[in-house]
Image: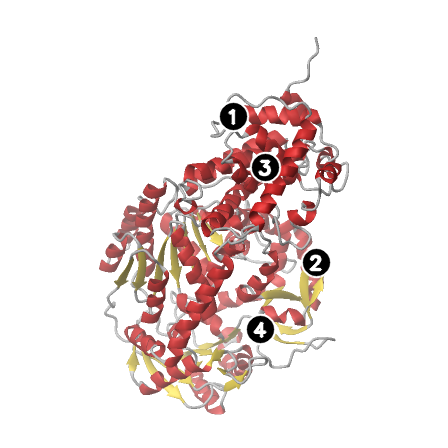
């Protein structure tokens, strides 16, 4: 007697994914659903208990909803239209499988309180429910009655529905999912019709529920659930895993002690104090005092505490404002931990970092774009592919230690299927925030708002600074609810490093040029820092010829932010070769902008700089007599030019860059100390003076306003499933800037893209990108074929981008600060 085929046989030809390159079969739907369930359990194991979801759900119910959603999220792919698409019998289907997936839920979930939350995870794992300008589920299906809904999903195979329902019951029972009906619900007389009925009803319930404003706890719980489901789905689709170990846990302190003993060092008092504190931390420690090690010891203690409280594996995030600083810290952490692969790089150019590391041992590029490689060294294309894979692993949250910008974490505020996982991943974690002086007030306010959310999600925050103004410490005390410990490291007892001088003329004045030339003539290593690219170019063109004539072609170098990425890497290597702290200093000239304030480990004999905010000047001073190995060195500060900005009204800015009041306050302080010896010990008191002013009071109020505005607009989650994708470009404009390729480099860019597949080719092509401020998109045109912006620019490899040639509609003014 012939009965119906077993479910496994029916479902064998039902695929979730099309075949990969070189494969004849796609991934089966049941394999993908089982893998996603297992990925959800990995996410649960690492995240731990979530106190933030109460009182809406307890943590156990939250994770039960996540696991059910992961097991059922792609059930709607049984529809024949979708199957024809993944079997490559048609180019596209046109409907949303997650909507149809809802129809399986009432037949496999026995807990009515769990059902609405599982529906949330299933329906929202790809698209917004509302507000997506025609792309959201309400726009697609909200007006469809039952009959129209059935017409749109008109090829639902009953046998596949029955087989998948049986398989879901069996798999849920085998994995012990709570809320599983015992015994299972009876088979539906008309499985296809019942599936459509239930899917239509549940979608309507969801849209009605989440179109209304949600309570704060409901909204946050909803986006965290969405984040858990999408994280598990992406992990299973990519066949990736999550690291389940935290190298900055209990074994880190003895590892650090051993490392320090090898350098004949012992823990300093502030490091030992930080290691024993539980809670938030404000750490003020001078450069060279072991600030980073103190923060890592603090993190190790928080990891132990948070693991005990949550039962998970806490992540540690080390945030810095600049990519070069991030890359250097990533290398340092990898060396400290002894496992470089355990440290993720979380910034927009992470793959470029991994590529640079992978190709560093090579002898360098030859004329035809290849490399002199020893046997076994990967080709550029292979290295790029591996670098992209490392970057992808971090985007999928693999590592438990990550170094990056705060902006990558702030993207969790955009929520939705693309960003809600970022929010979930911050739960029960430790955050080390370094170099906060670099953020202007609006961005600092956003970071503060997120810090309050991280605390609500079970996190703990450390703020590090060599010079932590009292006003900044006060902001964190007003923002965070939990205990905040302050640790001040004692001075290192080093002699003063700098002798301060001020000049009442501009850095580009002939008198300044003459003074700089005189120091070059004395065979000194001279650093000149301008506030904008135009001034840096003007100074370099005047000073470089004589320096090169006397000391060779590499004796004069220009560094600013408007170089092609590949050229800038070469420039930084040349600077380090001549002026690195571990090498004898060579006489010569470096003219730079603010980019020299971070990342480069360099040491010069003398500094000539334009006036700037005190924090920026202190960073510039730190590039001279860096380790106090010599007599105090001259740092010479010049009065800025006060100019207005286009579109900024009558407000004046120092050299068109920095707002006037803090620069003026710094100038007054410096003038009062003209001719004196100074060191880092003076800096905090000076900063407090700058911030204890009408400008400082306004700065404080503006930061709080930005914090509250960001929290209200993004972190209340009143409408957690409304589409926020339209805010992504505004977010990028605020944080990321843009990039463009020269018209003359278009073919080279295209050739590099073709050198390797996909993202690896784009990584190779990145060498031709020039960073620009986001407003400069109006200066470029979009190349649809290459998916890149193009500019017609005046560029050389030693001077960088000097201007953009006029085109119709291009309102760039020559000399305008780029």
Mark 3 — residue?
73
Task: Tell whether 485 sits left or right of 178.
Answer: left
| Quadrant housing the N terminus | top right
Q: Which one is in front in this view, the residue at disc 2 or the one at disc 1?
A: 1
> Mark 1 or mark 3, which has the lower sequence index?
3
- Pointer 4 with pointer 1, Cβ within 8 A: no
Residue 86 x/y as whole percent = 70, 36
Residue 113 x/y as whole percent = 49, 36
Mark 2 neighbour class, 10 Å CA radius: few under 14, some 14 to 19, many 20 or more: few
Q: Give the distance between the C-alpha atoms of the residues marked 1 and 3, in whole angstroms.
A: 18 Å
Mark 2 — residue?
786
Q: Which type of secondary structure does the marked residue at label 3 adopt?
A: loop
> Mark 2 or mark 4, which has the lower sequence index?
2
Mark 4 — residue?
798
Mark 1 — residue?
181
Q: Give the distance between the C-alpha atoms of the residues marked 2 and 3, in whole angstroms.
A: 35 Å
Q: Which type of secondary structure does the marked residue at label 4 adopt?
A: loop
Q: Which one is in front in this view, the residue at disc 4 or the one at disc 1?
A: 1
486 is higher (above) or lower (below) than 164: below
536 is higher (above) or lower (below) than 391: below
> Mark 4 or mark 1, which has the lower sequence index?
1
Q: Is residue 36 in view?
A: no
Q: Give the distance between the C-alpha atoms of the residues marked 2 and 1, in whole angstroms.
A: 53 Å
Mark 1 neighbour class, 10 Å CA radius: few under 14, some 14 to 19, many 20 or more: some
Residue 93 x/y as whole percent = 73, 41
Seen at 62% across and 73% down, the residue is: 796
Occupied quadrant, residue 326:
bottom left
Q: Nearer the viewer, residue 550 or 192?
A: 192
């Amino acid at each position: 007697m012939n009965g119906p085929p077993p479910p496994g046989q029916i479902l064998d030809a039902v695929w979730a994914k099309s075949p990969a390159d070189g494969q004849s079969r796609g991934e089966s739907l049941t394999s993908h659903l089982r893998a996603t369930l297992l990925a959800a359990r990995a996410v649960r194991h690492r995240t731990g208990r979530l106190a933030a979801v109460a009182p809406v759900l307890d943590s156990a119910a939250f994770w039960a909803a996540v696991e059910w959603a992961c097991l059922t999220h792609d059930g709607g792919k049984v529809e024949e239209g979708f199957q024809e698409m993944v079997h490559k019998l048609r180019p596209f289907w046109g409907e949303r499988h997650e909507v149809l997936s809802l129809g399986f839920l009432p037949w496999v979930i026995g807990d009515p309180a769990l059902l609405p939350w599982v529906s949330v995870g299933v329906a929202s794992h790809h698209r917004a429910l509302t507000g997506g300008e025609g792309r959201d589920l309400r726009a697609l299906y909200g007006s469809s009655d039952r009959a129209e809904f059935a017409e749109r999903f008109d090829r639902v195979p009953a046998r596949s529905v029955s087989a998948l329902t049986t398989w879901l019951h069996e798999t849920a029972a085998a994995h012990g999912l709570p809320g599983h009906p015992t015994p299972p619900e009876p088979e539906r007389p008309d499985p296809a019709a019942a599936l459509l009925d239930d899917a239509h009803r549940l979608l309507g319930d969801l849209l009605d529920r989440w179109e209304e404003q949600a309570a704060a706890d409901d909204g946050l719980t909803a986006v965290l659930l969405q984040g858990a489901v999408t994280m598990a789905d992406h992990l299973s689709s990519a066949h990736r895993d999550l690291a389940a170990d935290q190298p900055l846990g209990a074994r880190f302190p003895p590892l650090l002690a051993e490392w320090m003993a090898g350098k004949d060092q012992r823990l300093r008092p502030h490091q030992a104090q930080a290691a024993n504190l539980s809670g938030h931390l404000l750490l003020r420690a001078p450069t060279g005092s072991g600030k980073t090690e103190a923060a890592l010891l603090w993190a190790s203690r928080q990891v132990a505490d948070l693991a005990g409280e949550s039962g998970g594996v806490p992540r540690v995030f080390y945030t810095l404002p600049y990519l070069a600083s991030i890359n250097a810290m990533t290398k340092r952490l990898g060396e400290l931990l002894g496992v470089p692969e355990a440290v993720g790089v979380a910034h927009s150019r992470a793959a470029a970092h991994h590529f640079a590391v992978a190709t560093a041992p090579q002898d360098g590029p030859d004329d035809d774009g290849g490399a002199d490689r020893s046997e076994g060294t990967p080709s550029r294309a292979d290295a790029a592919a591996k670098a992209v894979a490392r970057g992808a692993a971090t985007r999928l949250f693999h590592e438990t230690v990550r170094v990056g910008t705060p902006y990558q974490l702030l993207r969790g505020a955009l929520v939705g299927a693309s960003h809600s996982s970022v929010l979930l991943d911050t739960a029960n974690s430790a955050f080390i925030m370094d170099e906060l002086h670099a953020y202007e007030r609006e961005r600092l306010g956003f970071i503060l708002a997120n810090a309050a959310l991280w605390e609500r999600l079970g996190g703990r925050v450390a703020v590090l600074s060599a010079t932590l103004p009292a006003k900044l410490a006060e902001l964190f005390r007003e923002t965070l609810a939990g205990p905040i410990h302050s640790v001040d490291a004692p001075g290192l007892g080093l002699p003063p490093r700098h002798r301060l001088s001020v000049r009442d003329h501009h850095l580009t004045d002939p008198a300044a040029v003459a003074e700089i030339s005189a120091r070059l003539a004395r065979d000194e290593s001279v650093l000149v820092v301008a506030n904008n690219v135009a001034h840096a170019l003007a100074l370099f063109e005047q000073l470089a010829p004589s320096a090169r004539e006397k000391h060779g072609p590499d004796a004069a170098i220009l560094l600013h932010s408007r170089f092609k990425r590949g050229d800038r890497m070469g420039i930084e290597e040349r600077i380090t070769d001549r002026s690195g702290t571990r090498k004898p200093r060579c006489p010569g000239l470096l003219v730079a902008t603010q980019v020299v304030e971070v990342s480069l480990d360099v040491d010069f004999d003398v500094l000539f700089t334009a006036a700037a905010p005190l924090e920026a000047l202190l960073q510039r001073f730190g590039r001279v007599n860096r380790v106090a190995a010599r007599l105090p060195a001259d740092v010479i500060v010049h009065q800025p030019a006060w100019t207005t900005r286009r579109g900024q009204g009558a407000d004046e800015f120092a050299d068109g860059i920095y707002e006037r009041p803090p620069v003026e306050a710094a100038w007054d302080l410096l003038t009062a100390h003209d001719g004196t010896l100074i060191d880092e010990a003076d800096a905090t008191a000076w900063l407090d003076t700058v911030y204890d002013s009408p400008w400082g009071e306004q700065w404080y109020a503006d930061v709080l306003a930005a914090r509250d505005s960001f929290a209200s607009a993004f972190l209340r989650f009143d409408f957690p499933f409304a589409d926020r994708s339209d805010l992504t470009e505004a977010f990028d404009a605020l944080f990321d800037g843009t990039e463009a390729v020269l018209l003359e480099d278009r073919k080279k860019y295209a050739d590099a893209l073709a050198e390797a597949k996909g993202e690896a080719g784009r990584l190779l092509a990145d060498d031709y990108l020039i960073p620009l401020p986001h407003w400069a998109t109006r200066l470029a045109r979009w190349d649809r074929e290459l998916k890149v912006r193009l500019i017609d620019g005046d560029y050389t490899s030693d001077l960088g981008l000097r201007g953009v040639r006029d085109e119709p509609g291009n309102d760039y003014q020559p000399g305008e600060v780029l």
